[in-house]
Image: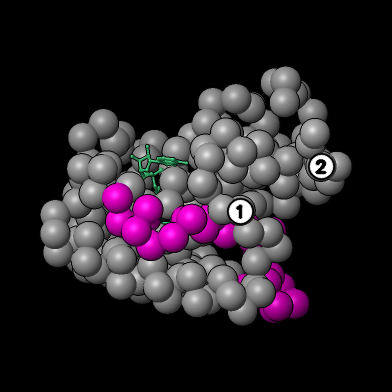
Amino acid sequence: MAHTTVLPPDHRPVVISGPSGVGKSTLYQRLLDEHPGILATTVSHTTRKPRPGEVEGTTYYYVSRDKFESLIAQDTFIEYTEFGGNLYGTSKQTVIDQTAKGSVVLLDIEMEGVKQLKTEQLRADSQINPRFVFIKPPNLTVLEARLRGRGTEDECSIRKRLARARAELDYAETGVHDKIIVNHDLEDAFKELEDFVFNVHSSRG
Ligand code: ADP
Ligand code: 5GP
């Protein structure tokens, strides 16, 4: 798709979820790069340490567990969870900041956060009404290879992430997402995601 400057007709936030290592960051980073000014991503808070190349305030806001807990107490988050031994959460402020730019906001969150947003969506005074897309690996062997190939996790973290992946896949089977994309071939998966975000319904030849 050529670079567009037009907001898609349905420009509600898009929640991208899927097991760790499936390719979410790769896909949404390319979406952001190809559609600057239209798409924006929320910046979550986390207690995990930055990986090489990650940038404070862009990739995440990196905070201590104490700080995160005080933010919970201040009702900062629209959703939060513990994942792989670390806390992750989306602040109300980051959704407001990005939405104010007239952008389609992308959220990269895991299953427990998706469940919380699903519950939030049902409230009369809901602060967010997103669409949900799930990125699925071709199989668990491929997922493990990608997670290991990325070279960012120690063995303990890999095991926690793979254990959680099974629960994520089971949850996706319940039909809660608006769209499921298998990330086998990156190019195909990217086009499918781009079409979903930009509300292109026709199939590509
Ligand atoms: P996530 O954000 O879901 O944890 P990443 O985007 O970090 O996953 O991707 C994990 C690894 O898999 C990265 O090394 C990435 O380059 C690689 N990867 C992503 N998509 C594909 C694909 N379709 N085929 C092969 N490798 C991929
Ligand atoms: P990572 O440590 O690989 O950056 O992220 C681990 C997992 O946390 C990923 O599945 C990612 O989607 C999820 N995640 C990142 N930010 C948030 C957040 O703000 N809330 C929730 N619930 N999950 C998040």
Give amino acid for label 1. Answer: Ile
Q: Residue 124, position in %: x, y? A: 75, 77
Q: Residue 26, position in %: x, y? A: 45, 38
Work out whether residue 43 or residue 175 is closer to the camera in this orientation and state it. 175
Asked which quadrant contains residue 88, the reply is: bottom left
Give amino acid for label 2. Answer: Ser
Query: For ligand 2, which image quadrant applies?
Result: bottom left
Residue ID at (68%, 59%): 179
What residue sits right under mark 1 in the picture? 181
Which residues are drawn in magenta? 118-145
Location of the C terminus by quadrant is top right
Q: Residue 177, position in %: x, y? A: 65, 66
Residue 43 in the figure: left or right of residue 31: left
Residue ID at (38%, 62%): 140
Residue ID at (52%, 31%): 30
Q: Residue 114, position in %: x, y? A: 54, 68
